[in-house]
Image (tube, rainbow, N blue to C red):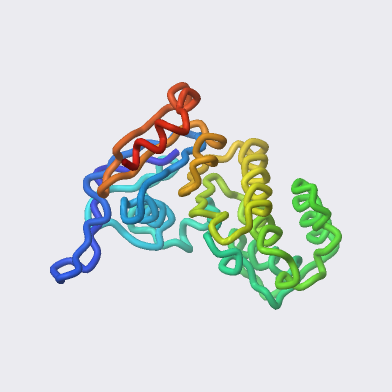
Amino acid sequence: MIELKQLKKTFNKGLANESIALRDVSLQVNQSEYVVIIGANGSGKSTLLNLVAGTIFPDKGNIQIDRTDVTTWKDYQRSKFIARVFQNPLQGTASDLSVLENFRLAALRTQPKQLISGVNKKFETLVKDHISILKLGLENKIHQPMGTLSGGQRQALTLVMGTMDTCKLLLMDEPTAALDPRSAALVMEKANHIIAVKKLTAILVTHNMKDVLQYGNRVIQMKEATVARDLNAEQKAKLQTEELYRWFE
């Protein structure tokens, strides 16, 4: 599903604050794999995610998604098959618009733009059906402004919005960092359910040790701008909290 070849990325090149973010990183992620990436600040994990998303471009290297070379594609060109959930719930939704209007905007991301692109009963029913998978009763609040909902509810809805149509790949960059523990657990549970039901390929960047152990079928540790460890499902199943903490000693 994803093939990264010898990716290099340096920020502020030639300046006093030059920072090497990635050093010759090569990585392959298979279809329906759920990869959890962990690492200290500055290890390169978010840079890797941003390169896959197309918000930044590599200095060198190649990015293929679903056997298509997307190295030079911008983020909006990749948005037809990539959904992303950010750290801040406010970043993925428009507060002043209703839940339904937010879904309309999300749907336009993957459809041809037309003069008539309003909301009809068919679309409203479709949105309710998709939201109902969350089992939070939010399908009954689709006409409420998004800003009236909690951060956890908004993150859960962002997950649904991003994966409604042609999404093949879900990228999550510390999606629970701004949430309280209860909301964080809810969002991770719902994300896990959606990934399983839709058979998505997913990458989660997190600092949460518990999430590393609980979610995904592969774990990667980034360290000093490269991949330090790459554990498959069998190895990950044997991973203990103590060993995980030792990675950061």
Q: Residue at x 41, y 44 (%)?
A: 38
Up the image or down, 173 lies above or below 38; here it is: below
Residue 125 placement, left or right of 33: right
Q: Nearer the viewer, residue 47 or 57?
A: 47
Q: Is residue 32 visible?
A: no
How many numbered marks have been drawn onto this rendered protein structure?
0
Outermost residue, bottom side: 96
Residue 209 placement, left or right of 227: right
Tell me the quadrant of the picture where the C terminus can be found.
Answer: top left
The quadrant where residue 92 appears:
bottom right
Up the image or down, 122 lies above or below 197; here it is: below
Task: Indicate the position of residue 105 as horizontal and vertical percent values.
Answer: 65, 68
Q: Residue at x 82, y 69 (%)?
A: 143
Up the image or down, 26 lies above or below 102; here it is: above
Task: Indicate the position of residue 210 as horizontal and vertical percent values.
Answer: 54, 40
Residue 168 placement, left or right of 239: right
Task: Indicate the position of residue 193 as horizontal and vertical percent values.
Answer: 67, 40
Q: Residue at x 51, y 37 (%)?
A: 34
Q: Is residue 77 visible?
A: yes
Residue 202 placement, left or right of 183: left
Tell me the quadrant of the picture where the N terminus can be found.
Answer: top left
Q: Residue at x 22, y 48 (%)?
A: 23
Up the image or down, 155 lies above or below 23; here it is: below
The quadrant where residue 65 appears:
top left
